[in-house]
Amino acid sequence: MRTYQADKNKQRNRWLTDQIFQMMCVIVASIVVVSLVVLISTIFSGAYNGITFAKSVPLLENDAGISDDDSITNVNRPLYRILDFTGPAKSNSAIYAKKTSESEAEGKQIGSSTLNNDGGGEVKCDALEEGIYDVWFVIFDADGNELQRSKSVQLTIDRQSPTGLQFDESTLGDRELNQAELDEFVIGGSGIEQTSRVELNLTDEFGNSVGPLAARIKKDGKWRIAKTSLRNLLIENGELKANGKIKLKAVQTDLAGNKQDAVALILDVNRENGKPADLVTEFDDDLVNLSVLDFDVSPPTNFKTFLTSYHHDNAPEVSGIRAAIIGSVLLCLVCAAFTIPIGIGTAIFMEDFKPKNAVLRFVHSVIQLNINNLAGVPSIVYGILGVTAFVYMFSLFPPAKANEPAKYEFGTNYYYQVNTLGGKIVQIPCTDKYQTTIQINEPIEATGSNGKFELQVVQSRVGLSDAQKAVSVKQGKKASIVTSEHYWFYFSLPFGKGFLAAGLTLGLVVLPIIIISSQEAIRAVPDSLREASAGMGATRWQTVRHVVLPSATPGIMTGTILSLSRAIGEAAPVLAVMGGIISNVGGPSNLMDNCTALPIVIYKWAKDASRGFHSLSASAIIVLLLLLLLMNSVAIVIRYRAERKNK
Amino acid sequence: MSSLPLDSDLPDSLKNRKFKSTQRGKFYENLVVAGLGFCALISIGTTIGIIYVLISESFSFFFDKNISLAEYFSPGDWEFGRLKLEDGESDIQIRHSIWPLLSGTLRITFVAMVIAMPLGLISAVYLSEYAPRRVRAILKPILEILAGIPTVVLGYFALRFISPYLLVPLGGFDSFNATSAGIAVGILCIPLISSLAEDSLQAVPKGLREAAFGLGGTRFDVTVKVVIPAAISGIVSAFLLAFARAVGETMVVALAAGTNPVMTADLRRPSQTMTGYIVETFQSEGVVPDTLPYSSLYAVAFTLFLLTFSITLFGQYIRKRYQESYE
Amino acid sequence: MSNEIQQSSEIDTALENLPADANLPTTHSSSAVPMEASEEASSRTAINIQNLDSWYNNLDFQALHDVCLRFEKNHVSALIGPSGCGKSTLLRWINRMNDVVAGASVRGTLQMGDLDILAATTDVVDLRRRIGIVFQKPNPFPKSIYDNVAFGPRLHFNIGKEELDELVEWSLKKSALWGEVKDRLKKSALGLSGGQQQRLCIARAIAVGPEVLLMDEPCSALDPASTARIEDLIYELKEQYTIVMVTHNMQQASRCSDQTAFFFEGKLVEVGDTTDVFRNPKEQRTEDYVTGKFG
């Protein structure tokens, strides 16, 4: 008999594999959990930037103008500039500084600016002595109420002695430039004191002077003239304005106001061959203006504004999700009203009315297969179906066009409107809405501000009293059609791009889900109950109604609520049917009116270029998630109570 | 007819039974059955509607004189923007190869599957075979929460977090790229694969596992060599269903994948997908019925529908055909 | 609503092609009750079964072969026999419960008084008002006790609230359950014990005022104490109703029933007064069964 030696190595390997695999499983599970956590925290942090529950301090952001440790040397007169401000019109900003060492002191205002939508202009602040300062800004509205205060940035004022200002002569000189060289031509220099300003003055031979031009300053003391400003000053119609020898003089002014001259440079421009001398210099993109504090501000809104206001373009701080919430609720109602009866009815039919005939049983299985497959169809395809079936209704009915009312409609009035001779506007009832104007040749019944009266027709206004003028029009006067407001129950065929069509489309999306979950709930009712009921002489429908449905109701309700929560989060079909219009949309005014919905605003705001709207998008996501949480909790409570009752 | 028992202690209601009419009941019953049958027909009507709408409008697209089927199916560009009419001549530049959009879809689906398949399957295995009860009680709800998150939220996540903070710093990535959208779609599909695969794994009877353990297998042996092969049909069908879901995903790609149909294998470039194109076209102005861009919408949707429908059908077929039945 | 007898066309033709007694095993039992034409006998008969054949699975399996049997009014008739012998099938055909079983078919005569139960035109709803049924495992509806009993009357009668209260009380008293539940009529029926639930099912069945009560192994899921109570109940109920009881338990049959029919493999082997069948069975197989040699 052979005995097999247990291979200890192999055993250990297998044990190791097991352990490794288990660890891998744990890692994977952790990744899943972590990704959810990261997702949620991203949303919350995105929202935090936009929404505050109380007035709190936004982040103060500086651009690359500030060196790494957020302090600036050699500044004793800081410039500051607010970029990308979006807020109430006529706001002002003021900048304050206080010495860091004096923690108790109030800040001293060192500068202020008015703000418009692109930010504020550059503002030169008051001079500061050497030292280390905390600098912050405050934003006021037009009435002087403080809207927002930023965190403070530390600023170091440290004057250095100036080095010499020089032109860089290697690029200049007494020479003729061809076009290519002109494009590369640079007027620049070095030796600039940090955070000073350099200005260039040009005078030509004849004493005409142009300038001063400001130079941009690079980090290591180099400076350059901006290409376009030089060109604009010197060149007109492709030709130099000046001629001959041009004197360029650079002056450095530091922020304390001290000036320093540079050596003047003569530029000889030779125009003999008709070639223009294009004195352009490069504008070096990584030139950075160290003297500027750039603040990027999107003032936050607060929660109340967010919930109660409509969307405003370009103004995230006054935009809100009110229209979206109204729209989502309405869509959900329409969807539920359509889907729930049909879905539950189908489920009952498929479960409790199974045919025995072989042919019908085949049909039954086809229907079941169909339902299962519909659950996997992408929602955008449902959107397309909805557009064709509900919005345009397979082009069976002519739709409403710009000057043509829809053919089949109900719930709106048309009338013709005309000005009487007395200047009053009166309305004449309309019998044929396709006739857009009528001519008044005879007295006709009209309605004015005082009620109904008969509109008179006269040949001329001469000799009429005011009262008569108020109720007359000239012979042949034309009145054009006006439509009254649509009542809330306005209804037209085809449905057009409105929330009725969108709700029905959403209903189609969730219909397979409701059917499947209701089927499972109905299947869960034990057959013994059905038998008992049948034994008592109940028909199939009576059994369903009195026995099966009451038992299956908790399961059906749970499935329904979960399906509706899916419908609320669907954006694609709604986008397809109603388009993604989120501005100028309040709640819908009638059944056929457009509306917006939560997922749509989330989508549009997330795509928006401005960062303020990104935060709003994240906040809207939070609202949506809370709504879903609420619905799921209701479903869980229902399931729990039903299970308890059955125990 | 019937002879009632003569017992005198019968209550009055049984002595004179006032029966409800069965004729009326019959009529009412038939009415109800007809109504319920009508409800069932609506689901059929939906499928018929989808097929009819897609086919009829695609016909008008494909039969337009500017469109050739050959170009649609061969590699090329996808461009509809340049319908110029100058002096009565039309300078139409339409490139209508489906390949760029298709490649966008496939790129994103590829990334999504790379993420979702391993993570989903291993989560399912972990939940079914390894996880202690407490971990299960946490992990399952988390998966259900992930499943319930609306897709726009994941689109936001991809556009405003994955792309700028995770991918762009790596260098070489455009701000709209296929990878960020793919990752988000993958996260979407993880719960789907996980729950379907877990159901299949649970359906494998305990007896098989016990037999394998009894032969001295480690849990890894049992799982990988016995349970997974037994449940393989369900697992493969889960993968296919997730694939179909990823192909049909709309909002994530609309937000994160850009609006540029490009035919390339580079995952760092924008990649408009079929679904993204449909959404974008619906939102652009001037797209009304009977224009060519409008019909192109339907052609793309039809292709999309064929793709997902056939994958879904195939997945169900695989599951039924290869399913081991344990009594 | 009338349920058609579900027969596919192949069964139709198959049945038509079968001559009345060709190749079908007939019952050998000489103790089968012969057909009596006398008026007196037929007025005592609640249910009359003649030449009943029944199939499952579209004629694949024949469950009953040429059964001839009578159930007398106000008597308890027990159907006994080993598993699968067809006794439950017979019971379920009496109130046409087998209609919903796909592939089940039947041929023969099954009458209750003048009513031909198996006819396609018979109103099954009305039939089930006249015949009540109690199942093996108690299956009260997950409703209140009151609603369980009131289910049938609400379904079939135009009845007012006070009359309904009275009816419910009467049914529960008749089922010997009233004393135990009269304070909690509105509570869920699922809170009752097994025996109480079965009595509730009996109350539910008699609330409609049937003539016949069918019981399919009513006590097999219950403990002995509840079984005893229900057997007592059956004894009382027979004064008012005709009871047909399927049972696995021979002692129960011998205790409760007046008439016993022994089935084996779909055929009626022996039928007669209970005391006779148990003490002096005429057939060998009957004796083997009742003495426990097989079962």
Image (tube, coloured by chain):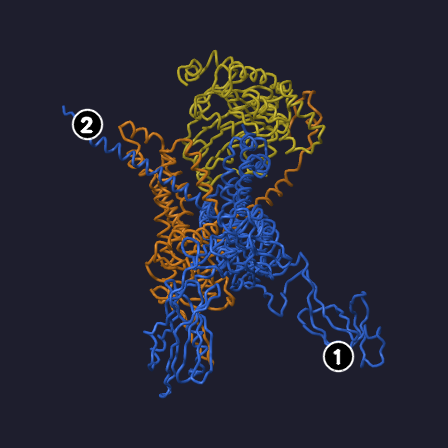
Determine which residue is flagged by label 1: A476
Above or below, comparing residue B188 to residue A611 in the picture: above
The crowding category of the residue bearing disc 2, from other C-alpha atoms within 10 Å (few below 14, some 14 to 19, many at least 20), is few
Circle 2 marks a residue in which chain? A
Q: Which chain appears blue?
A: A
The residue at 34%/76% (across/down) is: A172
Chain C tint as drawn: yellow
Circle 1 marks a residue in which chain? A
Give amino acid for label 2: Ala
CA–CA distance in space, label 2 to label 1: 114 Å
Give amino acid for label 1: Gly
Q: Which chain appears orange?
A: B
Q: Residue B302 at what x, y percent from top left?
A: 43, 59
Report the front residue among A83 and A197. A197
Label for residue A6? Answer: 2
Above or below, comparing residue A392 to residue C55 in the picture: below
Label for residue A644? Answer: none
Element marked by disc 1: loop
Q: Which of marks 2 and 1 is nearer the N terminus?
A: 2
Report the front residue among B118 and C121. B118
Q: Is residue A587 visible?
A: yes
Foreground mark, 2 or 1, reads: 2
Quarter of the image with the N terminus of chain B in it = top right
